Image (cartoon, rainbow, N blue to C red):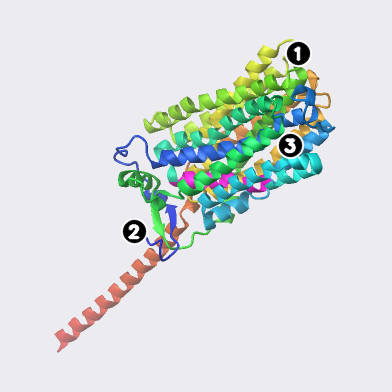
């Protein structure tokens, strides 16, 4: 592949007709694509930790006796806490599509680095702002963090569409996105421990803010936009990735076919199922600490531990699920489409069943409640081999914009879930009110996955190859022109021969 980066801006794109299964894998078992995956997973871990830090920390900030009473306590009601938790998503939903555009124009690598740095910086300010400026200032920092994190998923999808070979797409994508789940584990557990320690609840924000800044620096200097921009990548690994994804370089500007995307039925099916997943995911993530703490009267340290355990189990389960999914596709036991829909069914319908069961657990059965929560959250991780990679299936070139569109709509559910939960669950220690919330989430899960089963597909869409279409048109025109010239020349030769005979 020829490089002209020094003179002109070159776009790396995937052409569906050029995609092929490479004859052999790279010699090295560990390659540059794995290092990039690790860095992306670390960055996503930090992003999720920044998101969920307040889930447990707010309990310590409003109930000092449950943590360390030597630190300030704030008289915020549950409604105020719900506003603080949802404020992150006020910014988050605003930059999904903008982020996908900037990632294409400016580079996903640089934007992802900046997003991590900015999130870490504003998180460091929360303890001071909480004490001197009030909960409104905390909301402001959360909105800013949300604005920057709104660019993260479009960035990751853009990067993965260039770094994850077709036969490793499930494993690499799941590994990267499961970084968010282990981020939940570490954050939920550490915030419970730190809040109760002599460092108090402010240390939760200082620790995770600093880790996010370090991660951003690592990704900026070690991470790369694509294999073509990695100067030290082995040639066999570079060819393996590029041949698998049908990559070519072009100086032609790649324009996003917004109208074709917005009128695509598979895209709408993807949007519906992603919205259902997002509702359930954030309802559980933001409300598990409250449910465990209120219904089962659990202290802050054990609350953090039990809130983290379902996500630790999910992270562990992500490895065999993604491996089995890729192997079944590679051995032609399942088609890509069948694998995506089966994994998505596991990831949404099994949690729906578990939540129905959870609704009937009484206060005297905390063990059963914890087991069902673990089952619901752990099975949900299968969606990373389901609809979560479907953006790259439909269009490797526009996976970022696709994620931007679907995640914008889906994360309206992230705002609504905790707010509606506060309306339904007016008495946090009431099992009956939690049951209504769990039932509503089960219905949403069921309908979301049903839509994906009926209308979803893994087929690459025609609008993925706009440059190819233009080339086909120009080649067709050139061929027609050549044929016309050939006919004209043939007529002239015939006329000359006829004149020669006459003479």
Residue beneath the point at 38% across and 44% down: 241
Question: Where's the N terminus, which quadrant?
Answer: bottom left
Q: Position of residue 155 (x, y in %)?
A: 54, 47
Q: From where the camera sits, is residue 182 visible?
A: yes
**Front-most of 498 and 354?**
354
- Res. 2 mark: 2
Q: Work out which residue is located at the far bottom of the displayed protein and give it.
A: 503
Q: Earlier in the sequence, mark 2 or mark 3?
A: 2
Q: Is 239 left or right of 207, judged from the image as shown?
A: left
Residue 292 location, quadrant? top right
Q: Considering the numbered disc 2 on the image, is that residue within a helix, a strand or a loop?
A: loop
Up/down of 20 relative to 476, above or below: above
Q: Residue at x 67, y 36 (%)?
A: 205
Looking at the picture, tell me which residue is in the foreground, 246 or 39. 39
Q: Which mark is residue 32?
A: none
Q: Nearer the viewer, mark 1 or mark 3?
A: 3
Left or right: 155 as drawn, with respect to 468: right
Q: Position of residue 465 (x, y in %)?
A: 45, 54
Percent across and percent down for residue 467 are 44, 59
Residue at point 48% right, 48% down? 221
Whether residue 143 is situated above or below residue 204 in the rendered picture: below
Gap between marks 2 and 1 measured at Cα: 66 Å
Q: Which contiguous range is marked in magenta?
A: 145-162
Q: Give the number of the disc on residue 85.
A: 3
Q: Which residue is mark 1?
A: 363
């Amino acid at each position: 592949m020829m490089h002209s980066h020094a003179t002109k801006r070159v776009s790396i794109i995937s052409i569906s007709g050029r995609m092929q299964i490479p004859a052999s894998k790279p010699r090295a078992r560990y390659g540059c694509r794995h290092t990039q995956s690790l860095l992306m997973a670390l960055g996503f871990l930090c992003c999720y930790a920044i998101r969920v830090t307040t889930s447990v920390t707010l309990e310590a900030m409003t109930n000092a006796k449950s943590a360390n009473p030597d630190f300030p306590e704030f008289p915020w009601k549950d409604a105020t806490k719900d506003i603080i938790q949802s404020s992150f998503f006020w910014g988050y939903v605003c930059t999904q599509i903008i982020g996908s555009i900037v990632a294409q124009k400016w580079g996903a690598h640089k934007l992802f680095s900046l997003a991590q740095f900015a999130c870490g910086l504003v998180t460091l300010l929360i303890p001071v702002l909480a004490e001197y400026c009030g909960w409104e200032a905390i909301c402001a920092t959360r909105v800013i963090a949300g604005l920057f994190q709104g660019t993260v998923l479009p960035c990751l999808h853009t990067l993965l569409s260039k770094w994850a070979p077709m036969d490793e797409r499930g494993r690499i994508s799941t590994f990267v996105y499961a970084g968010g789940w282990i981020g939940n584990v570490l954050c939920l557990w550490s915030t419970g421990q730190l809040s109760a320690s002599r460092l108090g609840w402010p240390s939760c924000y200082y620790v995770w803010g600093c880790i996010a800044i370090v991660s951003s620096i690592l990704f900026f200097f070690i991470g790369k936009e694509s294999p073509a921009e990695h100067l030290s990548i082995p040639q066999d690994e570079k060819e393996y990735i590029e041949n698998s994804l049908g990559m070519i370089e072009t100086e032609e500007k790649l324009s996003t076919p917004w109208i074709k995307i917005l009128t695509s039925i598979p895209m709408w099916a993807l949007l519906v199922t992603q919205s259902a997943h997002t509702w359930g995911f954030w309802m559980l993530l933001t409300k598990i600490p409250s449910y465990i703490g209120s219904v089962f009267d659990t202290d802050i340290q054990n609350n953090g531990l039990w809130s983290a355990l379902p996500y630790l189990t999910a992270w562990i389960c992500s490895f065999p699920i993604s491996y089995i999914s890729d192997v079944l596709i590679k051995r032609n036991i399942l088609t890509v489409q069948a694998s995506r829909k089966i994994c998505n069914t596991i990831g949404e319908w099994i949690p729906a069943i578990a939540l129905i069961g959870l609704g009937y657990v009484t206060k005297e059965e905390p063990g059963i409640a914890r087991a069902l929560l673990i089952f619901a959250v752990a099975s949900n991780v299968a969606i990373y081999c389901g609809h979560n990679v479907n953006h790259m299936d439909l269009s490797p070139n526009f996976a970022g914009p696709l994620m931007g569109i679907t995640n914008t709509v889906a994360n309206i559910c992230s705002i609504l879930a905790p707010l509606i939960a506060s309306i339904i669950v007016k008495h946090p220690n009431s099992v009956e009110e939690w049951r209504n919330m769990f039932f509503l989430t089960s219905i949403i899960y069921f309908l979301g996955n049903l839509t994906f089963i009926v209308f979803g597909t893994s087929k690459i869409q025609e609008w993925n190859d706009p440059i190819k279409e233009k080339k086909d048109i120009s080649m067709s025109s050139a061929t027609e022109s050549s044929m016309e010239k050939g006919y004209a020349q043939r007529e002239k030769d015939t006329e000359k021969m006829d004149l020669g005979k006459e003479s």
